Amino acid sequence: MPSAPAPSRATSFDPIVVVAARDEADRLPATLAALALAFPHARTIVADDGSTDGTAEVAAAHGAEVVRSPRPQGKGGTATLAAKLLLQATRAEHPPVILLCDGDLGASAGALGPLVEEVRSGRADLAVASFSRRVGGGFGVVVRFARWAILRRGGIVVETPISGQRALRAEMLPALVPFAPRFGMETAMTIDAARAGYRVAEVRLDLEHRATGRTPRGFAHRGRQLVDIVGVYLRRR
């Protein structure tokens, strides 16, 4: 359930930031501190996916609103809980930009400003961050399939189909929410935005996150991603 929201000083020029997190109590403080420096008047909501390590308490201690799923339901489901709080923003006279990001970015979250500016300037409706430096990862199977799925179902070519760092116009939310379950969220969002006629752009940024390498745990993670993205492809015929 959402915690009581703190009074917001945000203006129509400030983004509303939604941070997706699960068991990120160690990296979340640096992420939130960097976001506060980059967007000092932003309303920040942490979507906590059933964490057991005190992530929600850390988020609240750093002044963020918290939307928490009592048990893990996946990124898409928990981010949907946060997004539903923001649907009223779509009816504002000057709808804000919404920034979605992951809780493990740490200090690099401070580099997200150009992503917001890409939307605020009118150059794009949905802006997706691509990482300028590759950290970790497997053999690229999931990324290649996600690119192919977006091309087949959305008709556009993207370089970074599963990046969780995204800025979008608030008025797009009704076309995108509820987000696709679990790891299908980003691929489905890109397809749905393209189908609705929104302009999608990618912005290369110097970001870093908790990497999953070529380990049994890493391959299991990417296997779950692939299953969810295949599900997105099949449901969007």
Image (cartoon, rainbow, N blue to C red):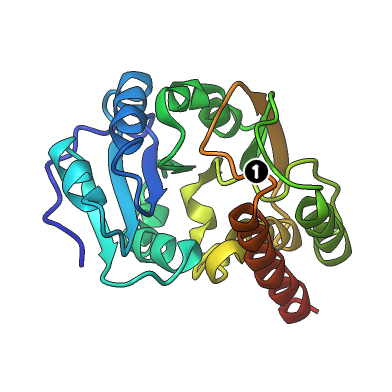
Q: Which quarter of the figure has residue 133?
A: top right
Q: How many marks?
A: 1
Q: Is residue 185 left or right of residue 21?
A: right
Whole-percent x, y for residue 166 in the image: 56, 42
Q: Which quarter of the figure has residue 115?
A: top right
Residue at 63% from the left image edge and 67% from the top image edge: 224
Label 1's element? loop
Residue at 71% from the left image edge and 65% from the top image edge: 226
In this picture, is 219 found above or below 164? below
Q: How busy is the neighbourhood of tag 1: few (under 14 within 10 Å), some, or many (20 plus)?
A: some
Q: Is residue 14 left or right of residue 136?
A: left
Whole-percent x, y for residue 165 in the image: 55, 40
Residue at 72% from the left image edge and 49% from the top image edge: 161
What residue is disc 1 on? 213
In this picture, is 210 found above or below 73? above
Residue at 39% from the left image edge and 29% from the top image edge: 13
The N terminus - image quarter: bottom left
Whole-percent x, y for residue 202 in the image: 71, 35
Q: Is residue 57 left or right of residue 199?
A: left
Q: Amino acid at mark 1?
A: Gly
Q: Residue furthest front?
A: 216
Whole-percent x, y for residue 185 in the image: 58, 62
Q: Please tell me which residue lies in front, 121 or 80.
A: 80
Q: Which quarter of the figure has residue 24?
A: top left
The C terminus - image quarter: bottom right
